Image (cartoon, rainbow, N blue to C red):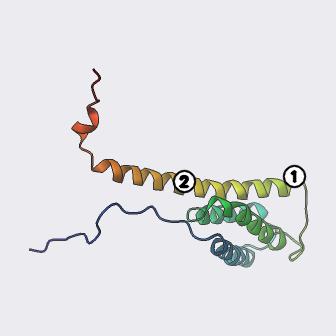
Amino acid sequence: MIEWVSLRTGARPVPKPVATPLVWAATSGSALLLVAVLNTLIGPGRPSLALTVLSLLAGLLGLRAHFAAAPGTAMLCWLFLNGFAIPPAGTLTWAGHRDTLWLTCLLAAALLGTTLARLRNAHAAYRRVTAGISPAAADQEPRGR
């Protein structure tokens, strides 16, 4: 009979976020690739679809990033959205309310991804810590005098 034995001892550490420059490098490469694919398959001039895809990218990258990486991630996604997803390609413009909304959506997506990752890691750590406590011991309250 084969018995599986864990080689780990003690509690598993909470995963550390990826360094901010690496997140920004991944953002630049991924955003460029996604906008290029969208422009090739669907064509430029569909900023709402590009915003949706880049918001998903920002949220996914936020899952492994520090909170400090969120503004840079949003800004890089916005640069590729503004520069290449809307005509004329290669020209950055600022259209007041529209670009403010886009930046807000991208920042919210990055922050949401990071927040969800932190909550998931905290919940997993809590469950690992409380798994060693028996339910009977956890239900008993210390009695006063």
- Residue appearing at x 64%, y 71% in the figure: 23
The x, y position of residue 113, in whole percent, is 59, 57
Q: Earlier in the sequence, mark 2 or mark 1?
A: 1
Name the kind of residue labelled 2 in the image: Leu
Q: Nearer the viewer, residue 107 or 144?
A: 144
Q: Which label belongs to residue 116?
A: 2
Can you identify the residue that label 1 sits on?
97
Seen as rendered, the residue at the extreme left is: 1
Instruction: Tell me if residue 118 can be seen.
Output: yes
- Residue appearing at x 26%, y 31% in the figure: 140
The correct choice, above or below, for 115 with respect to 46 in the image is above
Q: Secondary structure at mark 2?
A: helix
The x, y position of residue 17, in whole percent, is 55, 66
C-alpha span from label 2 to label 1: 28 Å
Kindly indicate the quadrant of the structure image that contains residue 9: bottom left
Number of residues whose C-alpha sits closer than 10 Å to that of mark 2, classed few (under 14), some (14–19) or many (20 or more): some
Number of residues whose C-alpha sits closer than 10 Å to that of mark 1, classed few (under 14), some (14–19) or many (20 or more): few
Name the kind of residue labelled 1 in the image: His
Instruction: Tell me if residue 52 can be seen.
Output: no
Q: Name the front one of labels 2 and 1.
A: 2
Q: Secondary structure at mark 1?
A: helix
- Residue appearing at x 41%, y 54% in the figure: 124
Kindly indicate the quadrant of the structure image that contains residue 77: bottom right
The quadrant in which the C terminus is found is: top left
The correct choice, above or below, for 27 with respect to 143 in the image is below
The correct choice, above or below, for 44 with respect to 66 in the image is below
Q: Nearer the viewer, residue 37 or 140?
A: 140
The x, y position of residue 79, in whole percent, is 80, 69
Q: Nearer the viewer, residue 4 or 132?
A: 132
